[in-house]
Image: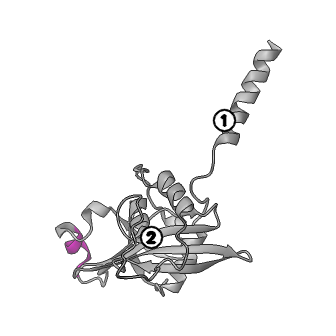
Amino acid sequence: MTQLKKIFIIIPFFIFSCTSVKYIEDYEPINVFLETQKIDKNKKHILQVDKAPNKRALRIFNGEEGAEHIVDPTDPIDYTDGLFVEKHWKKIYGQYAQDTIKKYWKKEDFPEYDFILEDGKGLFKYDFMVRYIGTGLEDAILISEPMYYMNKKYIMFYYSKAYSTGGVKSSTVIMKKEKENWVIVRVIRDNVY
């Protein structure tokens, strides 16, 4: 009986010790980034409640879809400023690209902002436009879950602003913690490659 008790104590400990943290625990880095975007905290803004897929951030960082990193020989500029490292890229891609579980933002994730949470499937459709016509709410923010990169030295996430008049400004944001503060290392705009 005592051996059985030991087994019941050891197994959960072993399981919990083998799990790794896949995502960050709070959204402080995103809040720090939003500060740089000069989003008026005294106004309402629309945030897509369903988090953008990780693949969007990964595609912008890589320059194209998929795990293969292909550099355009006619454009030798490294838009990642040396942050693309093959072994770390393979690790982040393998860990996050196939994550298709829907995740959702909550108002508590961004306590400084007055976000209206809207389903991504309804953004800028007829009902959405009727609901917000004349309110000044003409754009929506989309953000993915931050992902660890390069042995948790950096985090990376997708940030996009979509406009009701058409058009989208999308980017992958790369940040790291320096002296207990989150700093932006690089913002890579979409369609740069």
Q: Secondary structure at mark 2?
A: helix
Indicate the quadrant containing the N terminus: top left, top right, bottom left or bottom right: top right
Q: Are marks 2 and 1 in contact (CB under 8 Å)?
A: no
Nearer to the camera, 187 or 106:
187
Residue closest to the far right: 2
Chief SS of the magenta region: helix
Disc 2 marks a residue whose amino acid type is Phe
Residue picked out by circle 1: 15
Indicate the quadrant containing the C terminus: top left, top right, bottom left or bottom right: bottom left
Residue 151: percent from the left, percent from the top? 64, 60
Residue 181: percent from the left, percent from the top? 68, 77
Residue picked out by circle 2: 61
Q: Which mark is residue 113?
A: none
Can residue 53 be seen from the camera position used here? no
Q: Residue at x 37, y 82 (%)?
A: 75
Q: Residue at x 22, y 80 (%)?
A: 166
Q: Residue at x 42, y 82 (%)?
A: 76
Residue closest to the far front: 73
Give the side of residue 102 with respect to residue 38, left or right: left
Q: Residues within 10 Å of mark 2 (few under 14, many from 20)?
A: many
Q: Work out how far the residue at label 2 is from the one at label 1, CA to CA, in angstroms.
A: 33 Å
Q: Residue at x 39, y 67 (%)?
A: 70
- Per the rendered image, the range of residues in magenta is 128-133
Residue 134: percent from the left, percent from the top? 24, 84
Q: Secondary structure at mark 1?
A: helix
Q: Image quadrant of residue 130?
A: bottom left
